Amino acid sequence: MSSISNIFSRFMRHIKVNGAKLHSSLSRTPFYSITMFSLPPKNIQNRLNLSFPSEYSIDLISKNHIVVLKCSGRSIFIKNIPDMLTSGSLSDVEKSELHSFAWISLLDLNMDRQWRLLIRSHIDFWIKRFKNTAEQPAWSIYATSERLYNWIMQYNLISKTSDALFSTIFAESIVQQLKFLRRQMRLPLKLFEKTALIRAVVVGSAALNDHKKFELAIDELSVYLGEMDPLKSCQTTLEILKVLRTLIDIQAIVAFHKKNMPPEISEIMSKLAKIIRNIRHSDGGISIFQSEFTPSPTYIDAVLSHVRKNDQKETYSEYLRLQSFGGTTFIHLKNKYFPMEFSSGTQRIILGSYLYFLDQNLSFSREAKIDHKLHEEKNNVWFNGKSSFFINGRSTDFEKKLYINNLGTDLRGEELLSDESFSVTHHMILPSEISITPLEYQNGFFMDLKSGVRWMWNFSENTRFSFDFERNGILNGERKQFTLLTITTGSLHKNKLRWSLKLI
């Protein structure tokens, strides 16, 4: 009897998933918005009320009220946001971040009524200009989920400066966006998109006191997490933290309804929190591996404080942490190029490394065979990572070797791409406030930090390097200008790079 019930459940879920896919396709047609007409609710109440420190340092909020985009580090005046949403100067990723309205969290500061009225006018502009669901990226699943969540979280502050007409339009839009997300709730999305969608539905259902829709969303999340491996679906460490933060909000709403958190969700939260704890630098921030943004340490502390520590002796192999006496090295083991970060004490020295293929029309295989070996002797560490994949149908191997001494004062690396017909450049992201002095008799340079510490970089003879000193980003909640070190190899040993980094 149980097997019949399971078959029926899978059959019904299959129908619902296909229904969500149908709605997803129809939502991009011009007249789909008409089907979401709803009467405004009589009452909207933020049931979450969780307070977290800002992801940003207070220094990022200047007297000119500038918002700094996480995805690119670009500065935008909040008063100019409507113009930026309709201009061609921003990428779709940057526009998606603005469409999410996370920047209205600035309302938590002690702003005067005139400033709140300006932001209310931005919301009114968005509702009138982007009411058609075919508008992308305004109505992408992720942007819509984040926007609905942020509007409800700030509803009390926004409504304080609202007249009756705006209150009605605002409430109608909240209900329409909630209906849009509910119809697509069972889509097989990426983890950070799925959890964002579920959180928006859960917070929205609680705000409208719709207990039935809340329970359906929690059930969907439990089933979804039971069918996939969340640890493998996060592409970046920032996504891991983002998913964990989202699940904490869902946990708070579950507690509000005096329900028990499904074990599938609680278990995933413990595992994600353990990864975050493992990839933290001594400065309190997390490893970012090429990301433009990492939040403030106080924010990370707050997120982790909401998750109980997992006492199980379970280890995860996605990220490797190599600890020496004076330094810490992190390596992303599931990336076929094994990007790394290195910090000495509380100073980050290498904030990321990656390969860049000059031909942007190359086709890469989705799967890669990745393996690594680790050898330790007298606290010195030798790392050897190998990966195999296809480029334009041709088998290609990549190998990365790394040596770190026991003091964390001597690093040596070697990178080799087997196929020399592809032109690649090697990139390393360095701190911003550094002085560069070329070596006199060797191929390399001195890197002097603001603290007075000097490191020496050395490269093989066939190597050429250059610097870009104005790469914007946010490190530990503070805006920084990173230094991008670009390295190319000569024709003698093409695509083979050897380097060393020593503390002087």
Image: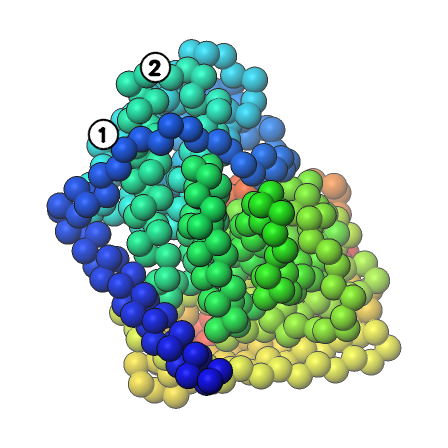
Where residue 87 appears, as percent x and y from the top left, is 24, 35
Q: Which mark is residue 163?
A: 2
Q: Which amino acid type is marked by label 2? A: Asp
What secondary structure is marked by label 2?
Answer: loop
> Dot 1 lies on which element?
helix
Neighbor class of circle 2 (other Cα within 10 Å; few <14, some 14-19, many 20+) is few
Q: Is residue 478 visible?
A: no
Query: Looking at the picture, which amino acid does disc 1 mark?
Result: Lys
Q: Position of residue 108 (x, y in %)?
A: 55, 25
Front position in the image: 10 or 212:
212
Residue at horizontal 53 percent and vertical 82 percent from the top: 370
Residue 231 locus on image (x, y percent): 56, 68
Is the C terminus in the top left, top right, bottom left or bottom right quadrant? bottom right
- Locate residue 482 relative to residue 25 in the image: left or right: right
Which residue is denoted by mark 1 in the rendering?
128
Q: CA distance from mark 2 to mark 1?
A: 16 Å
Residue 374: percent from left, percent from top: 70, 81
Mark nearest the camera among 2 and 1 is 2
> Can you see residue 240?
yes
Left or right of residue 290, residue 422 in this image: left
Residue 99 to residue 399: above or below: above
